[in-house]
Image (tube, helix red, strand yellow):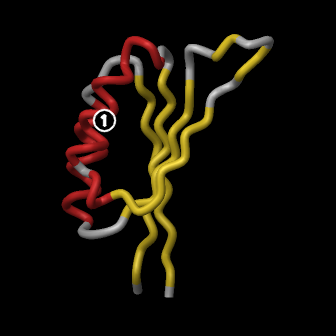
Amino acid sequence: MTEIWILGIYITDRLKKVSDVQDILTKFGCTIRTRLGLHTVKDDVCARSGLIVLELTGSMEEFVKLENELMKVDGLQVKKMVFAAS
């Protein structure tokens, strides 16, 4: 049985953490199948917080390394979902 891993990353301050997060995502680029970034825009002002959703591909060891590196960055909340797929 195969697992589908989804990581959710909530960034409390996109302006301060963007380079840290982007460096990690670039490092694990071959592990990321799908990346979706969401943030709120109101009255021509972008929210400082944001959400990134990642669908992962590859080995579980790489998934765990990516998750652990993201969790080391202050100002991030990292959550995962793991689905059993047939």
Image position of 36 with respect to 47: above or below: below
Residue 64 vs 43, above or below: the answer is below
What residue is at 33 percent from the left and 31 percent from the top? 21
Instruction: Tell me the crowding category of disc 1: few under 14, some 14 to 19, or many 20 or more residues within 10 angstroms, Cα based.
Output: some
Q: Number of callouts in the render?
A: 1
Q: Which residue lies furthest to the right in this view?
A: 43
The quadrant holding residue 33 is: bottom left
Determine whether 47 is above or below 30 in the image.
above
- The percent coordinates of residue 17 (x first, y second) are 37, 19
Indicate the quadrant where residue 20 lies.
top left
Left or right for 25, reference 82: left
Q: Where is residue 70 in the image (x, y as percent from the top left)?
A: 30, 35
At 25% from the left edge and 38% from the top edge, which residue is drawn?
A: 24
Q: In this view, does 12 lie above or below 52?
A: above
The image shows residue 14 at horizontal and vertical percentages of 47, 19
- Regarding mark 1 in the picture, which secondary structure is present there? helix
For residue 22, side relative to residue 85 (left or right)? left
Q: Residue at image x 20%, y 45%?
A: 27
- Indicate left or right for 27 with 71 as reference: left
Given the image, on which type of amino acid does mark 1 rest?
A: Leu
Residue furthest out toward the front: 44
Which residue is label 1 attached to?
70
Between residue 83 and residue 52, name the one nearer to us.
52
